[in-house]
Amino acid sequence: MYARYVSGRVLQAVLVLWAAYTVTFIVLYLLPSDPVQLLLAAGNVDVTQVSPEQLASLKHQYGLDQPVYVQYFTQLFNFVTGNFGESISKNVPVTQLLSQRLPSTLALGASAVALAIVLGVGTASLAVFARVKWLKVALSRLPSIGVSLPPFFVGLLLIQVFAFQLRWFPATGDKGPQSLVLPSIMMAIPTAALLAQVLTRSLEDALAEPYVVTARAKGLSRSVIQWKHAFRNAALPALTLLGLLLGATLTEAVVAETVFTRNGIGELAQESVLAQDIPVVQAIVVMAAALFVVVNLVIDLIYPLLDPRIVHGQRVT
């Protein structure tokens, strides 16, 4: 039964990835731009001085003179085999650009996600399980504040206080682990706030369920009831939300890398969109979709470990 559940989820993931690639191809193909003219402009070549024969030769070189369906299937095959083509504006392989920028973004995303999980789970747990009433009230208000703060404002505030005033961390650039601290906090705050909101409500609902009353009647300890029974059942909605938020990490990285001037995928995406560099934009969008699909696939595979009824067809509520 579990093998059937896994195969179904894997097939869904592949279909979502294919759909993301197809939609991206259609949208980018319809952009009102000429990739060959962009290529010439990137090389400081006056397009008016290029003959029609030379333009036709360049289009043939990049396969742009082929019918749309031929370009689609050719690029799809190249993507599947790891060939993302060549950047039009930078005239280098897209894989080279991605390999240069990806480590910085992965380090930033991983540290931000880890911090968001610690802050979100910690805040929700204290807001529900703390025995001091004023502390519970204060912690239950924190997620609303975290969600309402614009990320770029948080980033600028962090730079002003911790970089310019206290001089604890560098304000910009990618200069080792210290430069990860401020952008990670900026990215983690909204994710942690949403996670804490959902987990707090789920924990409160779980503690009101009859099985918790039964567990108390059996004489189980407070910690066993809270962490083994209530937290395990409350984790499913929070896990679903976490999957969606992790998939949006690359989008958040665009803002963080712009504010903190980091040389990562987010900044590359911004540069490529402005230059209408279609191969790079398409590779980044498909990579972001692949990240989203893989993260949610992993979470789908974790569900049955928390609630075996899911494998047998019952929905998570």
Image (spheres, rainbow, N blue to C red):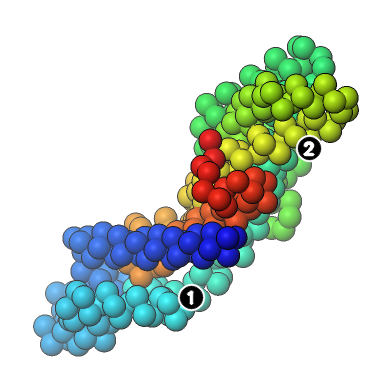
| Residue at (55% x, 50% y) in the render | 312
Out of 110 and 243, give the one closest to the viewer: 243
Q: In this view, does 149 lie to the left or right of 211?
A: left
Q: Is mark 1 on a helix, strand or loop?
A: helix
Residue 46: x and y, percent? 21, 74
Between the C-alphas of marks 2 and 1, the distance is: 45 Å
Q: Is residue 200 visible?
A: no
Relative vertical location of residue 259 with respect to residue 6 in this rendering, above or below: above
Question: Mark 1 Cα within 10 Å, few/some/many (few <14, many 20+)?
Answer: some
Query: Circle 2: is it few (<14), some (14-19), or many (20+) Cα within 10 Å?
Result: few
Name which residue lies at 63% across and 24% down: 205
Q: Name the residue under label 2.
A: 228
**213 displayed left or right of 46:** right
User: Visible in this render: residue 47?
Assistant: yes
Q: What residue type is labelled 2?
A: Lys
Residue 288, x across and y down, in percent? 47, 59
Considering depth in this image, is 222 or 105 the residue closer to the camera? 222
Residue nearest the viewer, comparing 24 with 63: 24
Q: What residue sits 30% from the left and 60% below the top? A: 23
Q: Which mark is residue 95?
A: 1
Counting from the top left corner in percent of width and height, residue 127 is at 72, 23
Amino acid tagged 1? Thr
- Give the residue at the far top of this rendering: 134
Q: In which quarter of the image is residue 57?
A: bottom left
Q: Earlier in the sequence, mark 2 or mark 1?
A: 1
Residue depicted at x 73% and y 55%: 177
